[in-house]
Amino acid sequence: MSQFHRWKTGSAALMAMAITTGSIAPMFMFAPASAQVIFNGQRTQTPSGRVSIPAGFTVPMTYDKDKIVVTPDETTRIKLKVARNLVDSSRNVLIPEGSEIEGQLQPVTRNGQKGTYFVAQELILPNGERQSINATSRAITRKEEISKGGRTDKIIQDAAIGAGAASVISLITGDRKIQPLEPILGAGAGAAASVLLRRKKTEVIVIEPQRGDLDLTLRSSLFVPRGYY
């Protein structure tokens, strides 16, 4: 009986510890894709009545195209959208679905592999309010080969294509119908063409937003309105 009593007492203490810990530590939970994202835990309110979402929280993002194709060395500006409402435990909307985040894809090297990642710069709420945001996606190193005579249909289907990748695909495959996100202008375009015309193959990075490639992790606290609606 004494052994059972000690086990019961220990279990009760452990449960009490868990409850206490849960009440002071933020909890982050993702609901199913069709639901909202719940920010559940302590919130620091600033004098202006805003709520601080802490560093480390991940915001799910989406993009208008199924894929984005860039070269490992290019930097290109894009605009993402928040995939689902971010709400607090009382269902107050902190960041509405469809809010935009402007930033750029830029080169990065991870474990010796060249890749790309998204660096967020500005959050744009549906009411037009803008504010700085310090967040990045993970590094994407998934690549596809572009070669003379190779088929690129699968790679570019429903894809937004960076200027560097558009030049690669156009000059190596001869497909002149590739439309880049932004044009390459001036001497840079001529230099790129000169190099690419001597190549028979190269690699591009394929980003798939629907797989979570561009979900953003906050690198510092984000201060947002207490309840958007």
Image: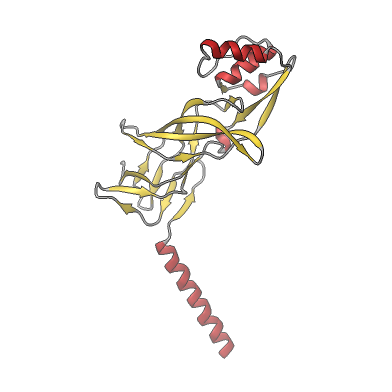
Give the residue at x 72% y 20%. 201
In the picture, which quadrant includes the C terminus? top left
| Residue closer to the observer: 159 or 38 | 159
In this image, 63 relative to 127: left or right? right
On the image, the x and y values in percent for residue 188 come to: 55, 14
In this image, 60 relative to 191: left or right? left
Image mark count:
0
Most extreme residue toward the bottom is 2
Give the residue at x 56% y 90%. 2
Quarter of the view holding residue 195: top right
Give the residue at x 52% y 30%. 105
Asked if 115 appears above or below 88 in the picture, the reply is above
On the image, the x and y values in percent for residue 37 come to: 45, 46
On the image, the x and y values in percent for residue 117 come to: 55, 34
Q: Please say which color scheme the image uses.
A: secondary structure
Asked if 190 appears above or below 142 in the picture, the reply is above
On the image, the x and y values in percent for residue 79 come to: 45, 28
In the picture, which quadrant includes the N terminus? bottom right
| Residue closer to the observer: 11 or 178 | 178
Quarter of the view holding residue 108: top right
In this image, 86 relative to 107: left or right? left
